Amino acid sequence: MDKYQFLITLAGVIFSLGLLGVAVRRNLLVVMMCLEIMLNAVVLSFVTSASRSNTVAGASMTFFIYVAASCEIALAMAIVVLLVKRHATLDLDAHQDLKG
Amino acid sequence: MNKLTLILMLPFLGFLINGLIGSRLPKAAVSVIACGMPALCFALTWSLFSGIYVSQVPVVEELFTWVAYPGFKVEAALYFDQISAMMCLVVTGVGTLIHIYSVGYMSHDKSFARYFAYLNLFLFFMLLLVLGKNLVMLFAGWEGVGIASYLLIGFWFQDSEKTSAGLKAFIVNRVGDTGFILAAFVIFFFAKTLDFQEINTFFANGQTSVAMMNLIGILLLIGACGKSAQIPLHVWLPDAMAGPTPVSALIHAATMVTAGVYLLSRLNGVFLHAPGAMTVVAYGGALTALLGATMGLTQYNLKKVLAYSTMSQIGLMFLACGVGAFNAALFHLFTHAFFKACLFLGAGAIIHALHGEEDMRNMGALGKKLPITLVTFLIASLALSGVPPFAGFFSKDEILWSAYSGVNGSLGLWLVASISSFLTAFYMFRAIIMTFFGESRVPARLEKGIHEGPASMSGVLILLAFCSATVGFLGLPGPLREMAGVTAPFYDFLAPVIGHVQVVGAGGHQVEGAGHQLETLFMGISIVVAFAGIALAWLFFSLRKQWADQVKGRAGYAYDLVSQGYFFDALYYLVVRFVDWVSESVLARRVEVGLDAGVLTAPNNSVNYASRLFSSLQGGSLQGYVLYVFIGLALVLLWGVLHV
């Protein structure tokens, strides 16, 4: 296994771990963290491809992703604060108001 | 693995062990790991230092290539030259002592292992900061110490005031970091490299315009201001005292807050070609030194007095950088680390004895009960006030002399620095008299339990006090060197990297001997100033207490202005309120309403309208369907007629 295969596999594993966390954890904050882990896995795959093809595009994509991610997390945290204000808990099960 | 990498990795290892399994280990094991790692680091640093002391050849260690693209390459490389060696010795040496002290100080805390994990993490990032060979490595450490500082200020996170103090430190530092990153971009734009040595040699050629050099210098200064708590980004430092006291000693006095001075000295090649930026550095530093000292006058919280004093002293270091005396700045950084750490740890011993009481109005007459603390605190205060022969005198005097004779030097700068030294002596002895002497104002419930800390705490205090008294002899000022016929090992050691910039200012044209006479005169004045400050404090707070109250009453608004920290917090509050108003009253109440109507409601309404229109076609009326069939037939016929 060369280093690119290893890195892509690693990115896949990290992504799956994040997905697993999003699916099974009930704590809102942990779910948010797992989302970020998934994002980082994607970034790792970008950087790996960029490094393999020896071009800058993939690597510079990283910065766009992180800028977008920091905006996203700022919004998401605001939403989390509002949700917690509503139900005074971080447990996802309590937040089921949208259930039809 | 070689020594340099090991220095970096050992504290990280300590962080991993204590952070992951520390809560399950006995306290003794946690303490041994936490104190052993920095002690080993110090031993390794010492051996590397003795090597470089003789050979004068920097040690370089390339770990791996971090980023490599056409036209842009960053090595994860470590660099151990004279400046790094000095910083490393301070960080690991004072760091080790403070770790040992913390074992006694934090012994009753529930989160013992978490505390030491954070402290080791801080040490790792601080070493990364001072050992990094390029701006990217330095920046990684720079941000890392920010995180460690945030975690440790908010260490007792059940108290929301402490977590918000941590947040404040983090957010104010973001402002500075923006300047840092922009500076790195501009530097890369011109020099096409981020390596310190290459940057310094590139800008030494003078190909870049002075305006651009000034821009880089100012941006770097903004970054340094954030981390080193210089005006106007100093507001986080007094609040940072919410953390455990050893943390204040290590991070917010001895090491992290001096990172800005390190940055300026490291990139001295840039600053020497940016005269405008140098002037701003010098006057900004002088302003911070003066304002910090005045703010220290009115505080009643013992730790906040020390915090403002730290800010003021770092202002003096910036002043030294601004007049080209980078080596004097580093020497003051070196001595300051010892005596300020000693002061904070002494304050910690008092707070420990009084079970968390920090207000000096509830202290007094502690000298008899805490003799070791009194003596060590006194020695460190004398060093800070600039009383010979304690360490602070020699380093501060060198700065005062440079403020007059250096590149941008003037009598005004010297005067401002001297006034702040006078105020420093005054507020330190105000604190000492209020804490250790006079009648006891300690609440009765605390009175019984007052005792010296365990041996680990007093031992560290004594060691640091010893250093505060003696390290000054490593860098005697010029006239004293000649008189005693000795050299200054500190300046000689740094000379290959940063020499004393040649004097072109006011004193420059005088012959050497006359300069020395003037310097001796200035030295005499600064001794008189220090003693005058001490005497005035004695008069105001011990002999004629009513005078202090009278002066306070006379000052009126001026007193409020100073005791509220010149309303910097109120100013920032206004800015935040303005942004809040924009987002609430303008964006949320006006713009968003329009957006909602245009982007969300309008398409929704038109879809609704269209669906009502088309659903009416299928109203279930048979006659309507017949009509549609005939309309369709008519259209087909029309098409046929037109196209055939």
Image: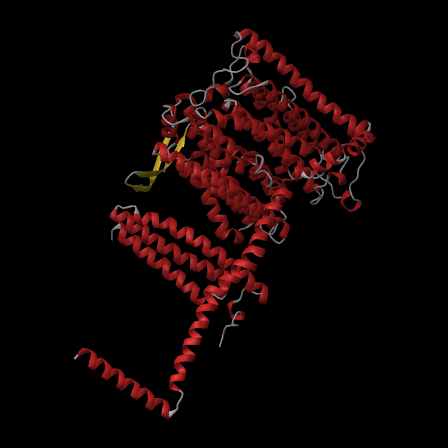
Residues B38 and B347: in front is B347
Q: Evaluate whether residue B6 shows in this view.
A: no
Residue B117 versus residue B88 in the image, above or below: below
Res B179 visible: yes
| Residue B282, above or below B573 | above
- The percent coordinates of residue B489 (x first, y second) are 50, 19
Question: Farthest residue toward the left?
Answer: B644
Q: Residue B76: percent from the left, percent from the top?
A: 36, 39
Give whichever of A17, B44 is nearer the camera. A17
**Residue in view at x 24 percent, y 83 percent:** B636
Looking at the image, which is closer to me, B209 or B406?
Answer: B209
Is B618 placed left or right of B327 in the picture? left
Residue most extreme to the bottom: B622
Residue B468 pos. (x, y %): 60, 26
- Residue under the image location 33 percent in, 55 percent down: A10
Q: Is residue B132 above or below residue A94?
A: above
Q: Position of residue B152 (x, y in %)?
A: 56, 45
Extreme residue in the front direction = B641
Q: How is the image coloured?
A: secondary structure
Residue ID at (72%, 41%): B359
Residue toward you, B450 or B483: B483
Left or right side of A42 for B82:
right
All told, the count of numbered labels is 0
